[in-house]
Amino acid sequence: MSHLDSLYSQVKQIAAQAGARQSDSTPCLVPPPHMQWFTPEEQAVLQELERKIIPFIPTGPGSTIVELGGPYLSLFAIRLPVDMALERMGILGAVCEALTSHERWILPRWWWLYKDLVIPSSPDMIAHKRRHILRTREELIERCRGIDFDRCPQAFYPFDKIGYRSMKGQLEDSARHIDWDMLEEWYDFAEEHQL
């Protein structure tokens, strides 16, 4: 059984224990019992995202969220990454127009963090994602542009000269894809070594 199938099964079990029925459910991003896993600041961001997204979600019989989302009709509990789910529902464009650029950036990141919390993955990975989930792209880029490699301690790839050159190249070439996970690792490395 895959991690996502396991998650789907867990959400169904929670709903059965709570006595929820699909017809009585309200669409949400995070199933109500799971909201407590997030800090008050994180909850506020999630609730604002929910306020903007949920009105677009089709919920009738045969709808994608009922088919894949389980009894809580939770967008984050379904098996597809959030952007793919919104696209399948035919509402990705409308949702993107309703969200700010930063909200569009963080929405899929919430989906991955939620998956890691439901099916516990490495505590270090969860901590890493939580540290960066609310950061803007601009914050990550500016912090890394300010790193003085000459002050970097000796380290293995990606924190060596080759990795540094690769990261700088990504940041300088706007047409190039940026490896955001790697950029976050450089951010942590710079903070840890006060670079």
Image (cartoon, grey):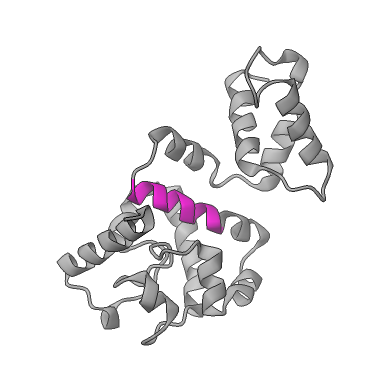
Locate residue 90 relative to residue 40 in the image: left or right: right
Residue under the point 31% across and 56% down: 1
Q: Is residue 18 magenta?
A: no
Residue 22's spot in the image, x, y percent?
28, 79
- The picture quadrant where one finds residue 27 is bottom left
Q: Position of residue 139 (x, y in %)?
A: 68, 41
Q: Quadrant of the C terminus?
A: top right
| Residue visible at 40% across and 47% down in the picture | 116
In this picture, which residue range is highlighted in magenta?
107-119
Pick the front one: 191 or 13? 13
Vertical relation: 183 (above or below) 159: below
Please tell me whether residue 138 is drawn above or below residue 17 in the rendered image.
Answer: above
| Magenta residues, dominant SS class | helix
Give the percent coordinates (x, y) of residue 108: 54, 57
The single residue placed furthest to the bottom in the displayed view is 61
Front residue of 96 and 120:
120
